[in-house]
């Protein structure tokens, strides 16, 4: 991470009061960036406010509400001036069998993960286009690179973020804006802790949550990738392999996943029979 890139730059971070967003916020404020965090008005946001950093504004906003996003960005502009970078980290995950997820679950994932990203980027675009050196960085997921059993709500929303990132990169390159998609695996955050107890056995076989990357590791990689204008950032060696195999040998990845799922189901059925 190069502090000179960020020093004095107004950066908007959604979901910046916890997880990867908080790690990014801490790195950015230390580097001298002028940071506006968009977060729900909860205990995490209140704790961040209590730090009382002169280069940090915490603006309460539900990213699913375009008006709240616009108001929060205005609060940031009033304190820090023109927005030069946007980093979207706000997101949710609720794993489960697709037929057991509610319509509300499916819609909420799209509203927060995809439309929350979209609303923020759209309302910051006039600033970014005026600077001719703006950056947009959006967190998708490794589950936005390949579909994953048990992520029937989460994975499609992250694929949508990936598609948005790829379109934005092409459209706004002529305006001097770089766009970076971030595709992390399991990360040691409150969100991961919350989803572990909801994972079906087949998903645990594919992604058991062991040895997750730290939020700081992902934030470091994300900010460095943004500095260099990379189209994608894929933290973690295993995730890089998955990305390569998904593109070069998709049949191999499908066979591996099917095998893991079959083993998990057979184990579950055997356990039921013994019981």
Image (tube, rainbow, N blue to C red):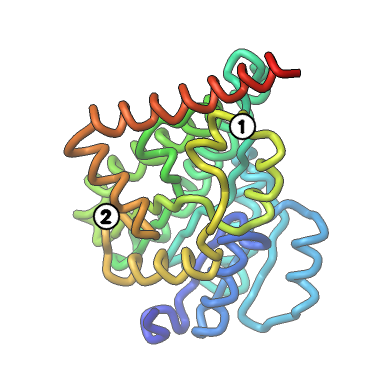
Mark 1 or 2: in front is 1
Mark 1 Cα shell of 10 Å, populated few (<14), some (14-19), many (≥20): many
According to the picture, the residue beneath numbered tag 2 turns out to be 231
Q: Quick one: 34 or 146, which is closer to the camera?
A: 146
72, above or below 25, in the image = above
User: What numbered label is drawn on residue 95?
Assistant: 1
Residue 160 horizontal side relative to residue 272, left or right? left
- The disc, 1 or 2, on the residue closer to the chain's N-terminal end is 1
Crowd class of label 2 (few under 14; some 14 to 19; many from 20; radius 10 Å): some
Residue at 47%, 64% (x, y): give it.
218
Furthest residue in direction front, as rendered? 274
Q: Residue at x 30, y 53 (%)?
A: 240
Residue 74 at least partly seen: no
- Left or right: 234 with respect to 200? left
Which percent across, then down, holds residue 35?
A: 57, 71
The residue positioned 56% from the left and 37% from the top of the image is 204
- Name the residue nearer the viewer: 55 or 132: 55
Identified at 65% across, 49% down, the residue is 191
Q: Are marks 1 and 2 in contact (CB under 8 Å)?
A: no
Q: Is residue 103 above or below residue 164?
A: above
Residue 61 pos. (x, y %): 69, 50
Mark 2 element type: loop
From the viewer's perspective, tell me whether residue 155 is left or right of residue 193: left
Tag count: 2
Along the horizontal axis of the image, is 259 left or right of 88?
A: left
């Amino acid at each position: 991470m190069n502090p000179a890139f960020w020093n004095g730059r107004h950066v908007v971070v959604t979901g910046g009061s916890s997880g990867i967003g908080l790690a990014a916020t801490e790195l950015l404020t230390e580097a001298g960036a002028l940071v506006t965090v968009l977060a729900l008005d909860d205990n995490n946001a209140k704790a961040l406010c209590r730090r009382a950093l002169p280069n940090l504004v915490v603006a309460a906003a539900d990213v699913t509400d375009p008006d709240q996003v616009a108001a929060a960005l205005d609060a940031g502009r009033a304190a820090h001036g023109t927005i030069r970078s946007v980093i979207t980290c706000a997101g949710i995950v609720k794993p489960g069998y697709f037929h057991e997820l509610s319509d509300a679950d499916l819609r909420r994932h799209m509203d927060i993960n995809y439309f929350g990203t979209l609303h923020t980027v759209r309302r910051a675009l006039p600033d970014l286009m005026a600077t001719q050196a703006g950056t947009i960085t959006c967190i998708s997921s490794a589950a936005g690179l390949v579909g994953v059993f048990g992520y029937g709500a989460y994975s499609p929303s992250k694929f949508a973020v990936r598609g948005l990132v790829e379109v934005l990169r092409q459209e706004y390159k002529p305006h001097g804006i770089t766009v970076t998609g971030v595709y992390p695996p399991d990360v040691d955050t409150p969100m991961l802790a919350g989803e572990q107890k909801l994972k079906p056995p087949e998903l645990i076989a594919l992604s058991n949550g062991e040895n997750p990357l730290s939020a700081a590791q992902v934030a470091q990689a994300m900010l460095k990738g943004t500095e260099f204008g990379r189209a994608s950032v894929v933290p973690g060696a295993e995730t890089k392999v998955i990305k390569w195999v998904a593109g070069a040998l998709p049949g191999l990845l499908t066979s591996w996943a099917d095998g893991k799922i079959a083993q998990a189901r057979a184990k579950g059925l055997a356990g039921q029979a013994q019981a």
